[in-house]
Image (tube, rainbow, N blue to C red):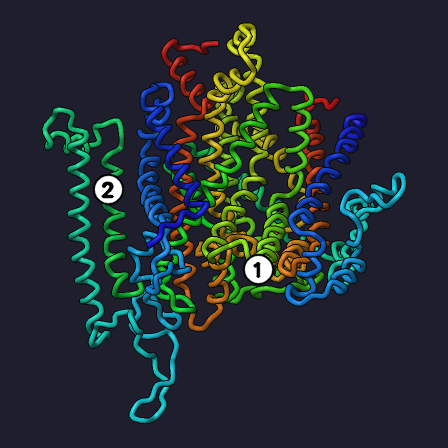
Amino acid sequence: MKPVILWTDGLIFLLIFVLCAFAWYASKRPHLSAPWKKVGESRSGMISAVVLMFFVGIGFLDSLHYRPADGKGAWSVQVLSAFDALASKMRTRTETTYSAPFATHSFQKEAVLVDGKPERVYPRLKYGGAELHDPARDEIPDVAKRVLASWGWAILAWIAAFVALALALAKGRSLKMSAAMILKGESNHPWDAMLYTLLALFLIFFPAFSLSSHYHVFGTDKVGQDVFYLALKSIRTGLVIGTLTTLVMLPFAIWLGILAGYLGGWIDDVIQYIYTTLNSIPSVLLIVASVLMMQVYIDSHPSLFETMAERADLRLLFLCMILGMTSWTELCRLLRGEALKLREMDYIQAAQAFGVSHLKIVTRHILPNVMHIVLISVVMQFSSLVLAEAVLSYVGVGVDPSMISFGTMINAARLEMAREPMVWWSLAAAFLFMFSMVLAANLFADAVRDAFDPRLQTRSALGILKRVIGRNPQ
Amino acid sequence: MIAYLARRVLYAIPILLGVNLFTFALFFVANSPDDMARLQLGIKRVTPEAIAIWKHAHGYDKPLFYNGADQGLQRFSDTIFFEKSASMFAFDFGRADDGRDIAREIRMRAGPSLEIALPSFVIGMMTNITFALLMAFFRATLLDMWGVVLCVAAMSISGLFYIIGGQFLVAKLWHWVPISGFESGLSSLKFVILPVAIGVVSGIGGGARWYRTLFLEEIGRDYVRTARSKGISELAVLFRHVARNGLIPILTGAVVIIPSLFIGSLILESFFGIPGLGSYTLDAINSQDFAVVRSMVFIGSLLNILGLMLTDISYTVADPRIRLQ
């Protein structure tokens, strides 16, 4: 086993490291952690955070890549991930073609010799429900037995999580009191809602995983791959697009925006010209043109990439860069406006009067005061990027065709609805997973925006003031 | 106002030049004309002569930016960049790889694109405003809350789902309209209805929620309280005061899109087989026809700049206090 760190893996690790570092840094500074506390008190925000953490967990496992030994003393050219290793049954047990969810027989008739005569029958699947003697009779009890058994494990795991949380929050109280406090929702944070979300996730995914090694939970696609596996693999691609794109564009947006607003003059003119120009190209066309060029470049330089995964990965990274290139202008414009406003503030003027250098003023005084705008736009953009990936891949200018993503799943299934009988499960799985991920991201983004947007805060603060003194404070 | 507009038009020229320079760099820096020729002729086993012939036929046998072999201004004008972008400004887009005139193609396809884009835009705006007003009227009730929840859920559904689901339900299962295709004239109606409906439905989530916040912002204003304290009914307050003022940011914000409607929608048109500009672009992408993609980028930017200018004008129309100087 030889670990492989693909480009996007490295960036994901960097991102996680930065987030952890920031969390540690902010936890000691009340002015930084206060808005996050507010996010932590939001019910919908924390429920969606639990769901998102689940997706992120799968995405992270799927980012630990390695190349297994090929048995001949060399490394296989196939790049696998820790998630692939966990789900190896789902990955390797491929049928020959379509099969419905929980099917034991193939979806299409095949010619089989029965008593020397060729007959067209639905053959048994190679793996789906292969242990059953009489599928028509045994399947439902078998599935029920497995579901019940895994629910037992799910509840045990949930109780363990509950006890761990109660212990962590006990702070000198007894475990019973702490648990009661959590369940009654007496804490500032909606622990009860989070625990119930966790329970729901456990109750869904424990049986799903346990059944997936005996059945094809979401059926199989045209080439017989397990659709549940494909949907789970798509999560990483979606997460990478949603996070790395903003990571790529942030330096441009932040520095150019602040410099334009703070320095003014010809620098402002140049930066404004650049982003007006980029902005006036319709973003879809800009993305399309850029991806087209990248595609041609990759096609005409095949020797640059050692494995297929590397090529697909670099293409994903380029896609992030291209999406970032088209999306930084809006944030840049916002930051320029904010920096223009901040430049006239008394504390900046004071710093200038003291002779503090421009670089220091920007990093110490302006940057921290525009971070809320950056953060809000980052979390708001995530979901639209995930959705955009599907559309772009569908159009044919998205991720590499060999990379599993929601877009490539939908693209591969585009003609399946027209089949008779209809093949619905690939599309259903792709849309279901994408919907739950985007919905969770949207709800979380709303919670973050509510906590960080000073406009909303001043309004509510004004409201409180009005109520306290009984008239308009102005 | 006229002086302002003249200045805006003049300012558009360097931007368009920038757009051209940018797309040019995009198309030629990563991939030299040789690469393009090889791609068009098939990657393997292409003789250098064949490449030279292709480059000459398509006008790519000159230096990119600077021609040292020429004299005076010719040094800059006898280059690929000058020839390809100067003709753009004269709306001469040249020919596509299949030999058709791009300008004529664009003229022919703008109609079908508009037939989809304009109704979805107008009907979409009206539906969104209606839903937003409804939620604003029943604000802070269960109806409002569930409306917002539904909006967020609708926002989280991929646009592809609306299209595939709609096509399946309306066209395949119920047989109300043909699945895809297009005819000119009045009979186009049956082809247009479904894409327009899907365009409207897929925009409701984001649109209605956004407009609701705008209306709620307006409802919190002092003049609304004054109107209410005069004893005007809540319905009259909403329609006579709030809706009118709330519509200003909505309408001026929407103006910017109007010129871009010509470009049509890439996805909708390709799904429904509408011979519009969107599907034209998409076909060009799939056949890697650079001339077409470049022309579409140029036209799209032009319309976008036009949209920004119209936005400025619409501000003065909506709010007489604003004067453009």
Q: Secondary structure at mark 1?
A: helix
Q: Position of residue A344 (x, y in %)?
A: 57, 12
- Which residue is at the front of the view, B174 or A420? A420
Asked whether, in this view, residue A226 is left or right of residue B88, the answer is: left
Identified at 16% across, 42% down, the residue is A160
- In this rendering, the answer to whether A96 lies above or below B68 is below
Q: Quadrant of the C terminus of chain B?
A: top right
Identified at 33% across, 38% down, the residue is A49
Residue type beneath disc 2: Tyr
Checking the image for residue B271, the label placed there is 1
Checking the image for residue A328, the label placed there is none
Identified at 46% across, 21% down, the residue is A368
| Whether labels 2 and 1 share one chain | no
Chain letter of the residue beneath label 1 in the structure image: B
- In this rendering, the answer to whether A240 lies above or below B234 is below
- Which residue is at the front of the view, A272 or B233? A272
Q: Position of residue B213 (x, y in %)?
A: 49, 31
Chain letter of the residue beneath label 2 in the structure image: A
Q: Which residue is mark 2?
A: A196
Q: Quadrant of the N terminus of chain B?
A: top right
Q: Position of residue B120 (x, y in %)?
A: 60, 49
Query: In the rendered image, which quarter is residue A296 located in?
Result: bottom right
Residue type beneath disc 1: Phe
Q: Position of residue B47 (x, y in %)?
A: 72, 65
